[in-house]
Image (cartoon, coloured by chain):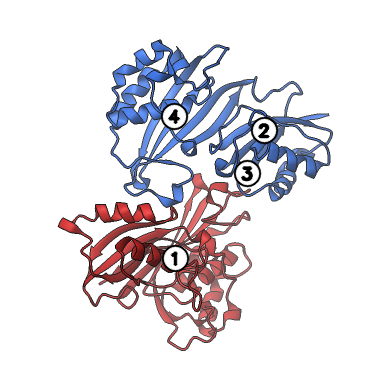
Chain colours: A blue, B red
């Protein structure tokens, strides 16, 4: 038995998320398992680094799987990658494959994740970004957003930034970095979050809250009270899925 | 009667080109006329700067039209633009509108056009660019392509670079500039052509020919013979429509 770690990119627009509880049809996991199983002529189950919601995209989602075959002859993954990408739909690309330890686990061993939220700040909306950004035509106070972002850094209980009300496990997470960058020539504002892990909908609620700060609807100084309150009612809206990208997942 | 000049962007993927002879269904012109006529409650006919093929995109296509209504009160186009873009499909955006001379003609008065051809040079294809670029995974000799491009500059009979065999009018055109740029971080190669006008499929045949030069299938020194031969058989393939953008149209 061989064990593999893969990095995959996808545009989530057409899919019902990475994996939906109780319903695996039209999910990314289901589609990738189907194509891998068919191509390798054995039943393949893949385990992702985490779920992404319906409509969320990935540049560097990671999954692992086990299979009986040696897929990387002479350490050259190109023939496998070319073949599998020919079989995958055009909105899913496996960008790398490597051997991994049989006990490697894409979710449990992840130590750092980076997500990016993309905001189209053009007046009438950039049609070429319509599926991969959230359009906010009203001018945003980027300075205020950066102030709010700074107050989110570090280790906190992010319960107020989580959509799962029945969360039983710890909701303490560490955010290492939030980078807010404006690309003026493309009218694009990106919020890049790096942390040791993120709760359900956490990046979208962080983004929605920072957008509301940028719009002047909230004050960056409210952030500490939001964190302390532990109540979803204190934070901003869940920003639309289509603006969100899982950028990469890091392992020790 | 008032006369208007508009600039429009569109992703051509879903459409049967700007205008198809003998069949106006599902063309960009037809869709824009339909929405304008409905919104303004009068029959509107628009005249574009030229046709774009099925699958070709535009950042700055120009059209003119006449209508009985004053659409730019106090010289502020924003309310018209917001309203019309709310009615247009998400893959078409009218980005500007201004008053023009009643005799202004978007096609006949155009003096300069710029097209861009976008080539995805990543190994497995950037899925986010799948509808707006042509994927060429084989490494391209950009130096050779630039040599070929230089030999295309100036005023020539471009008959060999035209798909229309029954062309009765002059096929002499002037290319002012061809800029070939590599964006290494995005694995994107762009060919930007500026000229006083382009024949049917001319930019796609120029791009196909330059790609074949980049692949080493042709020699840049063949270009003068291609131009002199006046025969479509001498030039390269018609590069796929989806990589092509009409960038802008200039008027005196």
Q: CA distance from mark 4 to mark 3?
A: 25 Å
Can residue A158 be seen at all in this image of the molecule?
Answer: no
Q: CA distance from mark 4 to mark 2?
A: 23 Å
Position of residue B221 in the picture relative to residue A98 (left or right): left
Question: In this figure, which residue is indicated by the disc labeled 3?
Answer: A92
Contact between marks 2 and 1 (CB within 8 A): the answer is no
Q: Secondary structure at mark 3?
A: strand
Q: Secondary structure at mark 4?
A: loop
* Lower position in the chain sequence, tag 4 or tag 3: 3
For the point 70% across and 39% down, which residue is it? A32
Q: Nearer the viewer, mark 3 or mark 1?
A: 1
Q: Nearer the viewer, mark 2 or mark 3?
A: 2
Contact between marks 3 and 1 (CB within 8 A): the answer is no
Q: CA distance from mark 2 to mark 3?
A: 20 Å
Q: Secondary structure at mark 1?
A: helix
* Lower position in the chain sequence, tag 2 or tag 3: 2
Q: Nearer the viewer, mark 4 or mark 2?
A: 2
In the picture, which quadrant includes the N terminus of chain A? Answer: top right
The residue marked by circle 1 belongs to what chain? B
Q: Nearer the viewer, mark 2 or mark 1?
A: 2
Q: Residue furthest bottom?
A: B168
Can residue B124 be seen at all in this image of the molecule?
Answer: yes
Question: In this figure, which residue is indicated by the disc labeled 1?
Answer: B28
Position of residue B204 in the picture relative to residue B50 (left or right): right
Contact between marks 4 and 3 (CB within 8 A): the answer is no
Nearer to us in this view, B2 or A173: B2
Q: Mark 2 vs mark 1: same chain?
A: no
Question: In this figure, which residue is indicated by the disc labeled 4?
Answer: A238
Question: In this figure, which residue is indicated by the disc labeled 2?
Answer: A23
The residue marked by circle 4 belongs to what chain? A
Q: Which quadrant of the structure image shows residue A154?
A: top left
Contact between marks 1 and 4 (CB within 8 A): the answer is no
């Amino acid at each position: 038995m061989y064990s593999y770690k893969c990095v995959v990119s996808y545009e989530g627009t057409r899919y019902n998320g990475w994996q939906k509880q109780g319903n695996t049809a039209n999910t990314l996991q289901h589609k990738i398992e189907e194509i891998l199983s068919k191509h390798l002529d054995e039943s393949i189950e893949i385990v992702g680094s985490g779920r992404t919601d319906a409509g969320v995209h990935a540049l560097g989602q990671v999954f692992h799987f086990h299979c009986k075959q040696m897929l990387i002859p002479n350490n050259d993954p190109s023939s496998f990658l070319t073949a599998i990408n020919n079989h995958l739909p055009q909105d899913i690309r496996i960008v790398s494959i490597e051997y991994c330890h049989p006990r490697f686990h894409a979710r449990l061993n992840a130590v750092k994740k980076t997500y990016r939220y993309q905001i189209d700040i053009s007046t009438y909306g950039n049609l070429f970004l319509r599926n991969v950004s959230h359009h906010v035509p009203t001018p945003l106070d980027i300075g205020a957003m950066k102030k709010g972002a700074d107050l989110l850094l570090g280790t906190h209980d992010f319960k107020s930034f989580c959509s799962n009300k029945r969360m039983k496990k710890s909701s303490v997470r560490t955010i290492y970095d939030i980078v807010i960058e404006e690309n003026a020539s493309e009218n694009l504002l990106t919020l890049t979050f790096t942390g040791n892990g993120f709760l359900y909908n956490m990046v979208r609620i962080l983004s929605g809250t920072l957008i509301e700060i940028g719009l002047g609807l909230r004050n960056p100084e409210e952030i500490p009270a939001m964190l302390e309150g532990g109540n979803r009612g204190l934070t901003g809206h869940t920003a639309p899925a289509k603006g969100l990208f899982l950028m990469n997942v890091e392992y020790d």
